[in-house]
Amino acid sequence: MMTRTGDEPMRNVLTSRIWIGAAVLALTTATIIDAQGPTPPAGGRGGQQPTTPPAGGGRARGGVMGAGPGDAPYVDAALADKGKATWAAECINCHGTQARGTDNGPNLTRSLVVLRDRYGSELGPFLKKGHKMQSGGSATALADDQIVNLAHFLRQRVNDSFRGSPLFQAQNVLTGEAKAGEAYFKGEGKCATCHTATALNLAGIGGRLEPIDIQQRFLFPGGGRGGARGRGGPASSASAVKVTVTPASGESVTGVLLQMDDFNVSLRDASGAYRTFKRGPGIKIVKDDPLAAHHALLDTITDKQMHDVVAYLETLK
């Protein structure tokens, strides 16, 4: 949910919808959500966040990453163009033209800071810590409007990595080393903790999917399109995101998470009933995402490791 124009955006606490399939870790974790709701971010002020799809912008696709905001932020093309100017002046040498990284800096299209950002809500605080820019100055010098513009530019780059984008071009992703991928899968990546070559959707995956689809489902697995608005999949899905709501007075209710924003949380309980709770003082919310480890992997796995794992999974035929 977005605030009115001119208000500071409040940070959405929901991790958003994620692609179908599962390829690596599925470690369950529980996260306690602050009952008071999110606090206004340091960046992203200035009333630039749109409340309707801006002309030429289009709806963002960042939410499908599994770690992005639940309301799928819009991209304002005009603000993204302004962000591009700042990007070229301060960021391009390290992170590349399309923000996909270089030898000097990481790929930001799968950075959790970027994927979770909503109009500077995550990017602003990160940059305000004093991130060094290519001009030699500190990112603390960036104005809030510049941060919002950069957020739109980066969200646009994320969107362009999806098949629905007119700029998307399928590339040969089968460039890794299968043996190195197997070593990572069974070792550092801890994938074998939950997955084997003959179980959990991996049996014959190399014969069923093209390498580019293996890569996408390896990095962004989940219930995908099966659940309400794509959040967590259907109740029968092993990847369904569960939530337990405990009101200030009354019994706890557990079910599949359908929607959570700054004001309400909705779920479908074991009986199939739809339940909605208003967030506020005294209410406790615990979210259980079985794919949390996959989301965390985005921030640690290198491009080489990613391609190595894909090369290994492609051999499972």
Image: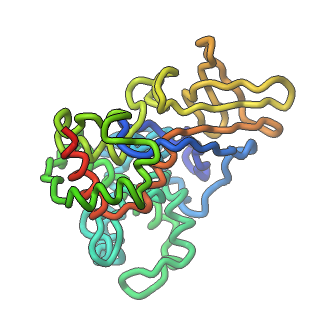
Q: Is residue 149 visible?
A: no
Residue 13 spot, x, y in % from top left: 59, 44
Q: What residue sits 46% from the left and 25% below the top?
A: 237
Q: Would residue 69 appear left or right of 10 to someone viewing this image?
A: left
Q: Is residue 58 above or below residue 9?
A: above
Which residue is at the front of the view, 184 or 249? 184
Residue at the bottom extreme, as displayed: 136
Q: Residue at x 57, y 29 (%)?
A: 257
| Viewer-nearest residue: 299 or 123 | 299
Residue 268 in the image: x percent, y percent?
59, 20
Q: Residue extending furthest right?
A: 249
Name the residue at 43% across, 29% down. Answer: 230
Q: How is the image coloured?
A: rainbow
Pick whichever, 78 or 127, lies toward us. 127
Q: Is residue 99 left or right of residue 262?
A: left
Q: Is residue 14 above or below residue 81?
A: above
Work out which quarter of the rendered image holds the N terminus and state it.
top right
x, y percent for residue 111 = 41, 59
Q: Is residue 120 left or right of residue 167?
A: right
Q: Position of residue 90 (x, y in %)?
A: 36, 77
For the point 58% across and 50% down, which residue is it? 9
State the image quarter where residue 87 is shown.
bottom left
Which residue occupies the foreground of this view, 5 or 255?
Answer: 255
